[in-house]
Image (cartoon, helix red, strand yellow):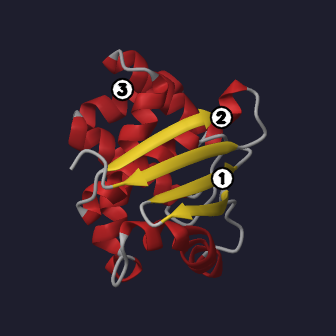
């Protein structure tokens, strides 16, 4: 996993809690990296999972909720850093651009990165089905990124995640309906 993800996680923890909490997490998880991340290097995703478990212990929140919250934070930061990926999009067209546009651009910059794979079904104007495949099984991060996209575009999103890798499936199905809750 690229160091930029760990840098964003550090920012998230410092923003939500404090720098002292980030230091405590490093001490509690004793990562091989010693908590020092450069944005372009690759680090074991197990370090991220260890941090998530430690944050869950610290907050009492389920790990899936911790990962979703981080995903919402990541989306906001990505929108601030790379606004060009969001321009001229609706939430649906943006989400449909993740695999064939955004991930392609990321791979150009970082050819050694391992990204999740998304495929799509387009059942209606106000709906989208995203099929998620990843050996890391960070589908809850995708949920948080989707929720963050809803906030960014000012659109309510109803998300159903009935098929999940965490329940033994070989992929996750994220069924979305836009305009929900507005």
Q: Judge whether 165 appears above or below 171 on screen.
A: above
Asked if labels 3 and 2 touch by Cβ distance under 8 angstroms, the answer is: no
Q: Judge whether 140 appears above or below 123 on screen.
A: above
Asked if labels 1 and 2 touch by Cβ distance under 8 angstroms, the answer is: no
Can see residue 63?
A: yes
Of labels 2 and 3, the one closer to you: 2
Earlier in the chain: of badge 2 and badge 3, it is 3
Report crowding for label 3: few under 14, some 14 to 19, many 20 or more residues within 10 A (C-alpha).
some
Q: Which residue is found at the position 63% from the left and 76% from the top?
A: 100
Front in this rendered view, residue 25 or 54: 54
Of labels 1 and 3, the one closer to you: 1
Q: Secondary structure at mark 3?
A: helix
Q: What residue is shown with label 2?
A: 164
Q: Secondary structure at mark 1?
A: strand
- Give how far across and how far down residue 73 sits, in percent: 32, 50
Quarter where residue 166 is shown: top right
Q: Which residue is found at the position 36% from the left and 39% from the top?
A: 69
Q: What residue is shown with label 3?
A: 24
Q: Which residue is found at the position 61% from the left and 69% from the top?
A: 99
Tell me: 85 left or right of 49.
left
Quarter where residue 105 is shown: bottom right
- What whole-number distance in Å separates the C-alpha atoms at marks 2 and 3? 32 Å
Earlier in the chain: of badge 2 and badge 1, it is 1
Tell me: 113 left or right of 28.
right
- Give how far across and how far down residue 101 sits, in percent: 57, 79
Q: What residue is shown with label 1?
A: 131
């Amino acid at each position: 996993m690229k160091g930029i993800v760990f840098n964003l996680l550090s920012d998230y923890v410092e923003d939500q809690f404090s720098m002292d909490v980030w230091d405590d997490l490093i001490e509690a998880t004793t990562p091989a990296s010693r908590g020092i991340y450069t944005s372009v290097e690759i680090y074991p995703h197990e370090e991220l999972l260890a941090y998530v478990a430690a944050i869950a212990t610290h907050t009492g929140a389920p790990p899936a909720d911790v990962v979703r919250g981080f995903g919402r934070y990541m989306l906001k930061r990505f929108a601030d850093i790379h606004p060009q990926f969001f321009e001229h999009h609706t939430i649906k067209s943006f989400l449909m651009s993740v695999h064939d546009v955004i991930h392609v651009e990321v791979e150009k910059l970082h050819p050694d990165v391992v990204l999740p794979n998304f495929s799509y079904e387009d059942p209606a104007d106000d709906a989208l089905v995203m099929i998620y495949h990843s050996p890391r099984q960070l589908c809850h991060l995708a949920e948080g990124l989707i929720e963050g996209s809803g906030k960014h575009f000012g659109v309510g999103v109803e998300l159903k995640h009935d098929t999940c890798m965490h329940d033994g499936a070989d992929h996750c199905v994220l069924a979305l309906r836009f305009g929900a809750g507005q």
